[in-house]
Amino acid sequence: YQDPTTLQLGTFGFNNLEFDIPAGNSSYYARLDWRDSLGVYVDVLAGYDVVNNEIFWEFQAIDPVTLLPSEDPDKGVLLLQDSTHAKYGHGFVNFSMKPRSTAQTLDVINARAEIIFDDNEMIPTNIHTNTLDALAPQSSITGASVSHNNQVSITWNGTDDPNGSGIAYYSIFGSPDGVNYAMLTAKTTATDTTFNINNNGDYCFFVLATDNVGQTETLSTANITCVEIVTDPLPVTWLHFTAENAENNNILDWATSMEVQAKDFNIERSFDGLKFDSIGSVKASGNTNSPVHYKYIDRNVNLLGSSIFYYRIKQIDIDGNYAYSNIASVRMPVVARKSIVYPNPTSHSVNIHISDTQLVGSEGQLFDLNGKPIMRIQIQSNLVQVNLFDLSSGIYLLKLSNGETLRIIKQ
């Protein structure tokens, strides 16, 4: 019932030592330097024997002088066990392998190891039995509502396959733009919750269930639920302030009816409507009783990886006082199919759900904000996991071959 192409070697050890094999490896070789404690090198070779349909590990003591297998009977991999060293003389190996696609829940997998020391007879271990839970659970949001104070209440439910191990927990993800989904709640056993969302416009959610053997369901975009949130805008202090998209640029347009000791207009931009950053400044007319018209162009916004932008103007007087305009939002032109990023922000890895099936088999490229290429990513299915563990904290842009640019935040 097991699929050998999914083999991943895990940790191994002997005596009181333990070693990690980098994740995703189905074969492994290393020469371990244990001359100080064992007086030998230890060659470790592991992998899958296609002919005999066996996973194997070989541990060979190597003479540090001849670099050949040691012939000294007192120098080997395993030390003599005694009352003060309970782990001496023992060893272990770990691996994982997924079931074949044809496996069914309640199918039984039996595994037994054969241990051979030098040229001695094989020593069989006990038979270890695993009963399969072949399918991941399914979940869906059953209700979503917004109260007057912008509290969003959602409910959900889920089921595991018959005779499965059962649902262990749920994880809830949310997004203000329908593309970048942050994990709002992790590993909850509840089926309802309430969030305070300070956001203008649509806010979207989805839930993923994980069963008791660690299988997490694959995101289905049909299970995404969105609600509309309307918050009170800041007071309007000018005749108007608007923003609109023009291809790769956003054009901000505003006018004042009168200015008294006005100094500057600072333009601030936000990707979530909460945290604003200054991106530019326009000098004010100063003192006038006549309407004055202003314009500012936020260029190349298509490279920033966001589908929605929020803008506000901070009017600063000569004496340092300031007031804000209303918030204007701009949505980028919607592509027919949008990829989804979750969890985002993330501290280790991020999942990319590819909605455009024509991207499968293509290649994406990850850049930092300076445009430096970081890595190439093969799109082999509609769900791609990108490991960011070795990257520094910051913002990265994933560019797909269909023109999509996804903004990823590494914490």
Image: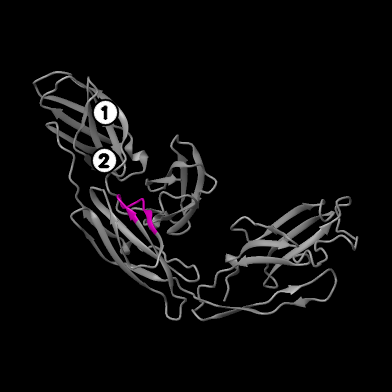
Give coordinates of residue 187: x percent, y percent. 42, 63
Which one is earlier in the sequence, the residue at label 1 or at label 2? 1
Q: In the shown orientation, is residue 353 left or right of residue 319?
A: right
Q: In the shown orientation, is residue 236 left or right of residue 5?
A: left
Three-letter code for the amino acid on which mark 1 is drawn: Asn
Q: Residue furthest front?
A: 84
Three-letter code for the amino acid on which mark 2 is drawn: Tyr
Of 249 and 51, nearer the camera is: 249
Q: Is residue 360 above or below residue 139?
A: above
Q: Residue at x 46, y 77 (%)?
A: 164
Query: Regarding mark 1 in the picture, which secondary structure is present there?
Result: strand
Quarter assignment of residue 163: bottom left
Quarter assignment of residue 220: bottom left
Q: Quickly name the residue at label 1.
A: 266
Of 49 and 33, nearer the camera is: 33
Q: Residues within 10 Å of mark 1 (few under 14, many from 20)?
A: some
Q: Quickly name the residue at label 2.
A: 310
Q: Residue at x 82, y 51 (%)?
A: 36
Q: Is residue 79 above or below residue 359?
A: below
* Start-end of magenta stretch: 174-185
Q: Nearer the viewer, mark 1 or mark 2?
A: 1
Q: CA distance from mark 1 to mark 2?
A: 14 Å
Q: How many discs appear?
A: 2
Q: Is residue 239 above or below residue 78?
A: above
Of 265 and 7, nearer the camera is: 265
Q: Residue furthest left?
A: 289
Give coordinates of residue 200: x percent, y percent. 23, 47
